[in-house]
Amino acid sequence: MAENGSTEPQATPQQPPQINMRVLGQFIRDMSFENIMAQKGVSGEVQPDVNVQVNLDAKKRPVDDQYEVIIKLEVNSKNKETGESLFLLELDYAGIFLVQGVPEDQLHPFLMIECPRMIFPFLRRIVSDTTRDGGFPPLNLDSIDFMQMYRNEIARRQQQPDA
Protein backbone atom coordinates (compact mmCIF):
# COMPACT_ATOMS: atom_id res chain seq x y z
CA MET A 1 0.00 0.00 0.00
CA ALA A 2 1.30 3.47 -0.89
CA GLU A 3 1.80 6.17 1.77
CA ASN A 4 -1.35 8.06 0.78
CA GLY A 5 -3.48 5.00 1.50
CA SER A 6 -4.08 4.02 -2.12
CA THR A 7 -3.03 0.68 -3.49
CA GLU A 8 -1.66 2.16 -6.72
CA PRO A 9 2.09 2.64 -6.87
CA GLN A 10 3.17 6.27 -6.91
CA ALA A 11 5.14 7.55 -9.86
CA THR A 12 8.61 8.48 -8.70
CA PRO A 13 10.62 11.01 -10.66
CA GLN A 14 13.59 9.60 -12.56
CA GLN A 15 16.58 9.90 -10.27
CA PRO A 16 19.78 11.02 -12.00
CA PRO A 17 22.58 8.51 -11.67
CA GLN A 18 24.72 8.94 -8.59
CA ILE A 19 28.10 10.39 -9.60
CA ASN A 20 31.10 8.76 -8.00
CA MET A 21 34.55 10.28 -8.43
CA ARG A 22 37.68 9.30 -6.56
CA VAL A 23 41.30 10.24 -6.94
CA LEU A 24 43.12 6.91 -7.11
CA GLY A 25 46.58 8.43 -7.42
CA GLN A 26 48.50 11.48 -8.51
CA PHE A 27 52.08 11.96 -9.58
CA ILE A 28 54.60 14.08 -11.44
CA ARG A 29 54.73 12.68 -14.94
CA ASP A 30 57.52 14.97 -16.16
CA MET A 31 59.30 17.96 -14.65
CA SER A 32 62.12 20.28 -15.60
CA PHE A 33 63.42 23.34 -13.73
CA GLU A 34 66.17 25.49 -15.20
CA ASN A 35 67.69 28.28 -13.13
CA ILE A 36 68.94 30.32 -16.08
CA MET A 37 69.90 33.26 -13.88
CA ALA A 38 72.41 31.13 -11.98
CA GLN A 39 73.85 29.69 -15.21
CA LYS A 40 74.31 32.98 -17.08
CA GLY A 41 74.15 35.57 -14.34
CA VAL A 42 72.03 38.69 -14.52
CA SER A 43 73.33 42.21 -14.17
CA GLY A 44 71.45 45.09 -12.54
CA GLU A 45 68.20 45.05 -10.65
CA VAL A 46 65.91 42.07 -11.23
CA GLN A 47 62.16 42.56 -11.49
CA PRO A 48 60.59 39.24 -12.46
CA ASP A 49 57.83 39.01 -15.02
CA VAL A 50 56.18 35.59 -14.73
CA ASN A 51 54.23 34.01 -17.59
CA VAL A 52 52.18 30.87 -16.84
CA GLN A 53 50.69 28.65 -19.55
CA VAL A 54 48.34 25.78 -18.73
CA ASN A 55 47.13 22.92 -20.95
CA LEU A 56 45.03 19.90 -20.07
CA ASP A 57 44.88 16.38 -21.40
CA ALA A 58 42.67 13.44 -20.47
CA LYS A 59 42.59 9.86 -21.63
CA LYS A 60 40.77 6.65 -20.82
CA ARG A 61 42.77 3.97 -19.04
CA PRO A 62 42.44 0.25 -19.84
CA VAL A 63 40.53 -0.35 -16.58
CA ASP A 64 36.77 0.37 -16.65
CA ASP A 65 35.77 3.84 -15.42
CA GLN A 66 39.39 4.99 -14.92
CA TYR A 67 40.83 8.10 -16.53
CA GLU A 68 44.16 9.88 -16.46
CA VAL A 69 44.00 13.68 -16.41
CA ILE A 70 47.18 15.73 -16.89
CA ILE A 71 47.77 19.39 -16.12
CA LYS A 72 50.64 20.63 -18.28
CA LEU A 73 52.19 23.75 -16.85
CA GLU A 74 54.91 26.00 -18.24
CA VAL A 75 56.20 28.86 -16.09
CA ASN A 76 58.65 31.26 -17.68
CA SER A 77 60.12 34.09 -15.59
CA LYS A 78 62.00 36.95 -17.27
CA ASN A 79 63.55 40.16 -16.04
CA LYS A 80 61.11 42.99 -16.87
CA GLU A 81 63.87 45.47 -17.72
CA THR A 82 66.11 43.35 -19.94
CA GLY A 83 63.88 40.46 -21.00
CA GLU A 84 66.55 37.99 -19.86
CA SER A 85 65.20 34.65 -18.69
CA LEU A 86 65.45 33.97 -14.97
CA PHE A 87 63.99 30.47 -14.79
CA LEU A 88 61.87 28.01 -16.72
CA LEU A 89 59.66 25.39 -15.06
CA GLU A 90 57.86 22.73 -17.08
CA LEU A 91 55.64 20.34 -15.18
CA ASP A 92 53.20 17.62 -16.22
CA TYR A 93 51.14 16.61 -13.20
CA ALA A 94 48.74 13.68 -13.54
CA GLY A 95 45.86 12.28 -11.59
CA ILE A 96 44.25 8.86 -11.95
CA PHE A 97 40.49 9.06 -11.38
CA LEU A 98 37.66 6.60 -10.97
CA VAL A 99 34.61 8.26 -12.54
CA GLN A 100 31.20 6.56 -12.48
CA GLY A 101 27.67 7.76 -13.15
CA VAL A 102 28.57 10.68 -15.42
CA PRO A 103 26.52 10.64 -18.63
CA GLU A 104 28.65 10.11 -21.74
CA ASP A 105 27.83 13.56 -23.15
CA GLN A 106 29.05 15.21 -19.91
CA LEU A 107 32.16 13.09 -19.40
CA HIS A 108 34.59 15.28 -21.38
CA PRO A 109 33.75 18.52 -19.52
CA PHE A 110 33.77 16.61 -16.22
CA LEU A 111 37.28 15.28 -16.89
CA MET A 112 38.57 18.68 -18.04
CA ILE A 113 37.00 20.77 -15.25
CA GLU A 114 36.32 18.75 -12.09
CA CYS A 115 39.34 16.46 -12.17
CA PRO A 116 41.93 19.25 -12.57
CA ARG A 117 40.22 21.14 -9.71
CA MET A 118 40.89 18.17 -7.45
CA ILE A 119 44.63 17.92 -8.12
CA PHE A 120 45.49 21.61 -8.65
CA PRO A 121 46.29 22.36 -4.96
CA PHE A 122 48.99 19.66 -5.05
CA LEU A 123 50.46 21.05 -8.27
CA ARG A 124 50.47 24.55 -6.72
CA ARG A 125 52.48 23.24 -3.78
CA ILE A 126 55.02 21.55 -6.07
CA VAL A 127 55.51 24.79 -8.04
CA SER A 128 55.99 26.77 -4.83
CA ASP A 129 58.50 24.29 -3.40
CA THR A 130 60.40 23.94 -6.68
CA THR A 131 60.85 27.67 -7.24
CA ARG A 132 61.90 28.14 -3.61
CA ASP A 133 64.33 25.23 -3.75
CA GLY A 134 65.63 26.62 -7.06
CA GLY A 135 66.80 29.82 -5.40
CA PHE A 136 63.81 32.09 -6.04
CA PRO A 137 60.96 33.31 -3.84
CA PRO A 138 58.20 30.67 -3.76
CA LEU A 139 55.82 31.15 -6.68
CA ASN A 140 52.25 30.85 -5.43
CA LEU A 141 50.06 30.27 -8.47
CA ASP A 142 46.70 31.99 -8.62
CA SER A 143 43.66 29.75 -8.77
CA ILE A 144 42.75 28.59 -12.25
CA ASP A 145 39.14 28.75 -13.45
CA PHE A 146 39.07 25.41 -15.27
CA MET A 147 35.45 25.95 -16.33
CA GLN A 148 36.31 29.21 -18.10
CA MET A 149 39.41 27.61 -19.59
CA TYR A 150 37.21 24.80 -20.98
CA ARG A 151 34.67 27.27 -22.39
CA ASN A 152 37.44 29.29 -24.04
CA GLU A 153 38.85 26.16 -25.69
CA ILE A 154 35.42 25.10 -26.98
CA ALA A 155 34.85 28.61 -28.39
CA ARG A 156 38.30 28.58 -30.01
CA ARG A 157 37.61 25.21 -31.65
CA GLN A 158 34.23 26.38 -32.95
CA GLN A 159 35.85 29.40 -34.63
CA GLN A 160 38.40 27.28 -36.48
CA PRO A 161 37.45 26.39 -40.03
CA ASP A 162 37.12 22.66 -40.66
CA ALA A 163 40.40 21.32 -41.94
Image (cartoon, rainbow, N blue to C red):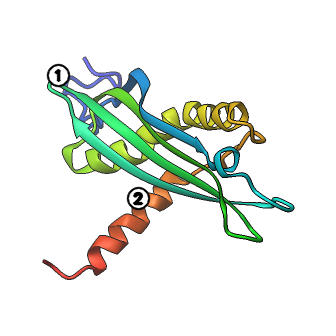
Q: Secondary structure at mark 1?
A: loop
Cβ atoms at labels 1 and 2 below 8 Å apart = no
x%, y% of residue 30? Answer: 41, 34
Q: Residue at x 34, y 50 (%)?
A: 109
Residue placed under numbered mark 1 in the picture: 63
Number of labels in the image equals 2
For residue 46, side relative to residue 106 (left or right): right
Question: Local crowd at mark 1 within 10 Å, few (<14), some, or many (≥20)?
Answer: few
Q: Secondary structure at mark 2?
A: helix
Question: Local crowd at mark 2 within 10 Å, few (<14), some, or many (≥20)?
Answer: some
x%, y% of residue 99? Answer: 30, 30
For residue 85, side relative to residue 146 (left or right): right
* Frontmost residue, 129 versus 143: 129
Which comes before the other along the chain, label 1 or label 2?
Answer: 1
Q: Amino acid at mark 1?
A: Val
Examine the rendered structure and indicate whether residue 151 appears above or below residue 25. below
Instruction: Please give the label number shown on residue 150.
Output: 2
x%, y% of residue 124? Answer: 61, 37
* Frontmost residue, 76 versus 3: 76
Q: Amino acid at mark 2?
A: Tyr
Distance from the alpha carbon under mark 1 to that under mark 2: 26 Å
